[in-house]
């Protein structure tokens, strides 16, 4: 059946939100696993009736269904060949919170952190907290029986789920508490379990993290035939769950974090039984290999101070009695046999330590070997008492297979997470992958363990279940599946009659790029395929930055469309490299997926995998239009510095002409700019035309970009005053020096390389003399700091990058510098996205704090993002992005608040949409310098 026929049937059945275009099918072809299965269509149900209609179409056509939440499954159980039911778009609400009963009723697509926010006013929370809690859905957690760091304190998802509303493939409603509906299914299941009591009592629930297979133990008579807990962890293979009632718990009053250092990971595992005696709520393990990755990617200060050792246990002791918490902490440390320890009672101090562990799945996307690391065997578990020995044997196993490993995980539960550098790009890669999985399964079973400790079996492990369970138990699984879903229409390929573990591996189907690339991709060995495969699907780009900070990914937050997330775009690019849906760079699906990318670079810093979608977008546009006629905006907005230099000769006339209603509209149309936008005014005099030079002080090169020179010369003048006050003698680059940013963002990379190469050569002459370079416009500073190395790709570019800094960074490195007092100044700060992503805004935050300012730092993006927000077709999304944080903050601003925005785009957006004028950091400092300087 074609996608068009399927869509027609669904529409006749009343379903309205259906996606069958190539970009969406490519985006949904993978989850966070290494598998690729292309769906025929995606349905985003608005209510239960849509689910029932979709089930009916599945029965009529034989097209299977896979339910999906946030798509963060690393086992491949959120992808399927038929219909994908994505609950995260519409069915994502917290329906009710009962503070007295300590329960909540939620739809399947509710994000875990949204539930936490709803429960917080009642002093409650949902216990399980997987590392993906900022984007995973409750339905997905139920599908996998997710656990998280605090399972020791709160239990698994199955322990915290009280009731479900679900539908069988036949369209029967099944409510599990109190049990009603689907009588024929329930009665057949009860009878089947009664025939297999011995199996249920001997092969299941042998330890807390036995997640693999169906949880038959919950159906035993002594456990009350608990259909709720049985369905949790069934991976969508038995019924489609639309609603859940969950248990909430009270947060303890006091939490203490203990970090214990050990000589190696196995030794850390050996002490777990002793640690558990003190009833920790969490006991996580971290290895130096992950810390090394963090330091190499984010700098030496990115990892907070850790105790001596090369492996660490991160433990939480919690309770309402502070004396008891401190007593257990003291006794635990004494019994820990650790080399060293650190006790942290301050939650803010503990947060960055927990974050390293939380970002583990993304950080581990590159193995210690430097090669891509893959999921597939990432969450096996053994009884905690045996975890130390298992870790040593597992290290030996990976060494025998020639793999490097970066372990971390829930050691207190006996659960270990790893990603491994399987050579999947080699002809025999899948066979080597299978051989390892077989040996690894045998190893974990020899320890009495489970193939999966929380992620489910999915495509990655279901075929190996016969190594863990007896033939009788495997037959019981098949018969249970037959009771619920005799035609195998619900999530086929998982658990029962599984796909082979080495089938449909995305990476093994990859093709090499044969055309010359414009960017160097140093971190990926010059391999564009490897670069786009940095995305492991962890889905952090789906996080609501309004609550949790950061920048990535503003377009997804605006549209809530998977295609518009960093992950969705990466999947489409991966399809171009691996699959058959997207043939080449010029494919409409590729450009559709990239169209709403703001090139904010938020992913380059916020995504733990280090993906850089802005760079990939530039490369795609470059390859697509090389030697061809381009869109008008490429010649207008893309060549903006060139046109600005021409307009600067007659600024008054240029402003008059573009201000006339008729002329303005024609000019906007010609430029490919949305008619609702305003054209910025050219300054009467550029900065360069008035700069006289400074004769005394330490030399510094002030990189005067086109935006500053032609539109905001007062920023450069303020910078000169601030730098002179700090003891510097600013000098400026030549008139021709340009970073080429607008050429880069429009994918004109050959021209950008020529322009930027000349600038780098000029700046390098100063750098060789030990003179630093200071940038004013964050996006241009970011080009010198990062893009030049990838685009110009020579030693001069590397030297210039190392010597380039922001004003705040330069002042922070200036001995004896003290900023003018900003006491009493209230600042609303909008860090430019490239400032956040490339340079980091910490130096600015510290300077403002040192000066005494009160700062409200906004996250997210302003929405203009250079040429993005002014181009036709982008206005609505640009405004939606601004409405996420910028516009609400400006609307709530009090009289006298200062809007601080170093980025020309950010200031333009605020002025355009809110009528608020912003200032640069140097202008704020300049004002106070003048206030403290007595007049003659």
Image: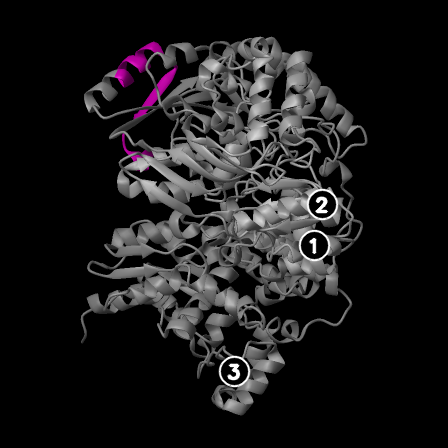
In the image, which residues are magenta? Answer: 328-349
Which type of secondary structure does the marked residue at label 3 adopt?
loop
For the residues labelled 1 and 2, say whether their Cβ atoms are less than 8 Å apart. yes
Q: Secondary structure at mark 1?
A: helix
Residue 358 shown in magenta: no
The structure residue drawn at horizontal position 31% and vertical position 62%, both measured from the top left corner, is 725
Q: Are marks 3 and 1 in contact (CB under 8 Å)?
A: no
Instruction: Tell me the CA gap for discs 1 and 2.
Output: 10 Å
Contact, CB < 8 Å: mark 3 with mark 2? no
What is the spatial separation of the Cα atoms under label 3 and label 1, in whole angstroms?
60 Å
Marks 3/2: CA–CA distance: 68 Å
Q: Quadrant of the C terminus?
A: bottom left
Image label count: 3
Q: Which mark is residue 60?
A: 2
x and y percent of residue 852 in the render? Answer: 23, 54
Residue to which mark 3 is pinned = 648
Give the left or right position of residue 851, taking residue 703 as reference: left
- Of the image marks 3 and 1, the number of the one nearer the N terminus: 1
- Label 1: how many Cα within 10 Å (few below 14, some 14–19, many 20+): some
Q: Which residue is mark 1?
A: 9
- Which percent across, then down, holds residue 154? 38, 26
Looking at marks 1 and 2 on the same chain, the residue that comes earlier in the sequence is marked by 1
State which quadrant residue 432 falls in.
top right
> Please, is residue 169 above or below residue 206 in the view?
below
């Amino acid at each position: 059946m074609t996608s068009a026929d399927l869509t027609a049937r669904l529409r006749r059945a009343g379903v309205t939100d259906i996606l069958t275009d190539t970009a969406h099918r490519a985006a949904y072809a993978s989850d966070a696993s290494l598998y690729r299965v292309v769906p025929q269509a995606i349905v985003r149900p608005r209510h239960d009736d849509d689910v029932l209609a979709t089930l009916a179409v599945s029965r009529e056509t034989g097209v299977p269904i896979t339910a999906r939440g946030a798509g963060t499954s690393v086992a491949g159980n959120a992808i399927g060949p038929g219909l994908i039911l994505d609950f995260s778009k519409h069915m994502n609400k917290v329906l009710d919170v009962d503070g007295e009963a300590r329960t909540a009723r939620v739809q399947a697509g509710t994000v875990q952190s949204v539930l936490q926010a709803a429960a917080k006013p009642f002093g409650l929370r949902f216990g399980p907290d997987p590392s993906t809690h900022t984007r995973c859905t409750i339905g997905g957690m139920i599908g996998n029986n997710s656990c998280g760091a605090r399972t020791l304190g709160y239990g698994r998802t199955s322990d915290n789920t009280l009731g479900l509303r679900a539908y069988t493939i036949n369209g029967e409603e099944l409510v599990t508490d109190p049990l009603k509906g689907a009588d024929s299914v329930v009665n057949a299941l009860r009878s089947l379990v009664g025939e297999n009591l011995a199996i249920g009592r001997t092969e299941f629930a042998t330890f807390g993290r036995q997640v693999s297979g169906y949880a038959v133990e919950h159906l035993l008579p002594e456990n009350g035939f608990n259909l709720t807990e049985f369905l949790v962890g069934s991976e969508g293979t038995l019924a489609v769950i639309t609603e859940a009632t969950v248990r909430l718990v009270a947060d303890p009053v006091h939490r203490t974090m203990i970090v214990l250092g050990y000589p190696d990971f196995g030794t850390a595992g050996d002490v777990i039984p002793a640690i558990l005696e003190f009833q920790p709520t969490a006991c996580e393990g971290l290895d130096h290999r992950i810390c090394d990755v963090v330091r190499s990617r984010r700098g030496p200060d990115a990892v907070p101070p850790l105790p001596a050792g090369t492996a660490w246990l991160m433990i939480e002791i919690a309770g309402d009695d502070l004396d008891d918490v401190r007593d257990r902490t003291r006794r635990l440390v004494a019994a820990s046999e650790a080399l060293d320890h650190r006790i942290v009672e301050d939650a803010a101090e503990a947060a960055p330590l927990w974050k390293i562990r939380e970002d583990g799945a993304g950080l581990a996307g590159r193995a210690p070997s430097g090669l891509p690391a893959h999921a597939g065997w990432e969450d096996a578990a053994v009884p905690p008492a045996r975890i130390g020995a298992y870790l040593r044997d597992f290290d030996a196993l990976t060494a025998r297979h020639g793999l490097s490993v970066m372990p971390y995980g829930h050691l207190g539960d006996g659960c270990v997470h790893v990603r491994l550098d399987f050579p999947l790009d080699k002809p025999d890669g899948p066979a080597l992958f299978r051989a390892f999985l077989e040996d690894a399964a045998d190893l974990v079973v020899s320890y009495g363990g489970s193939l999966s400790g929380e992620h489910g079996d999915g495509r990655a492990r279901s075929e190996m279940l016969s190594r863990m369970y007896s033939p009788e138990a495997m037959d019981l699984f098949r018969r249970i599946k037959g009771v619920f879903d005799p035609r195998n229409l619900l999530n086929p390929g998982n658990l029962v009659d599984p796909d082979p573990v080495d089938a449909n591996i995305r990476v093994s189907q990859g093709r090499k790029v044969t055309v010359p690339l414009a960017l160097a991709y140093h971190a990926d060995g010059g391999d564009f395929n490897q670069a786009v495969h940095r995305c492991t699907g962890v889905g952090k780009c789906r996080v609501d930055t309004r609550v949790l900070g950061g920048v990535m990914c503003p377009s997804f937050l605006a549209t809530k469309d998977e295609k518009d997330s960093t992950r969705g775009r990466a999947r489409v690019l991966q399809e171009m490299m691996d699959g058959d849906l997207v043939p080449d760079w010029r494919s409409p699906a590729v450009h559709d997926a990239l169209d709403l990318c703001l090139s904010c670079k938020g992913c380059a810093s916020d995504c733990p995998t280090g993906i850089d979608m802005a760079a990939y977008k530039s490369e795609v546009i470059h390859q697509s239009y090389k030697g061809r006629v381009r869109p008008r905006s490429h010649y207008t907005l893309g060549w903006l510095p060139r046109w600005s230099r021409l307009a600067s000769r007659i600024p008054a006339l240029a402003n008059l002409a573009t201000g006339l209603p008729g002329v303005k509209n024609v000019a906007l149309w010609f430029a490919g700019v949305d008619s609702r936008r305003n054209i910025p005014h050219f300054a009467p005099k550029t900065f360069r035309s008035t700069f006289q030079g400074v004769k005394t002080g330490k030399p510094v090169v002030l990189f005067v970009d086109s935006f500053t020179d032609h539109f905001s010369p007062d920023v450069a003048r303020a910078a000169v005053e601030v730098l002179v006050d700090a003891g510097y003698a600013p000098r400026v680059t030549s008139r021709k020096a340009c970073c080429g940013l607008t050429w880069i963002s429009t994918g004109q990379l050959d021209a950008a390389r020529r322009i930027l190469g000349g600038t780098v050569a000029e700046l390098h002459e100063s750098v060789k003399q030990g003179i630093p370079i200071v940038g004013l416009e964050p996006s241009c500073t970011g080009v010198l700091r990062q893009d030049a190395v990838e685009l110009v790709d020579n030693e001069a570019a590397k030297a210039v990058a190392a010597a380039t800094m922001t004003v705040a960074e330069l002042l922070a490195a200036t001995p004896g510098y003290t900023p003018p007092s900003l006491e009493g100044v209230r600042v609303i700060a909008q860090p430019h996205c490239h400032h956040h992503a490339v340079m980091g805004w910490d130096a600015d935050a510290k300077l403002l704090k040192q000066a005494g300012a009160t700062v409200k730092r906004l996250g997210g993006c302003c929405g203009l993002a250079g040429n993005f927000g002014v181009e036709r077709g982008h206005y609505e999304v640009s405004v939606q992005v601004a409405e996420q944080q910028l516009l609400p903050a400006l609307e709530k601003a009090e009289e006298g608040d200062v809007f601080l925005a170093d980025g020309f785009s950010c200031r333009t957006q605020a002025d355009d949409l809110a009528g608020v004028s912003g200032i640069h950091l140097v202008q704020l400092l300049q004002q106070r310098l003048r206030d403290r300087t007595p007049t003659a």
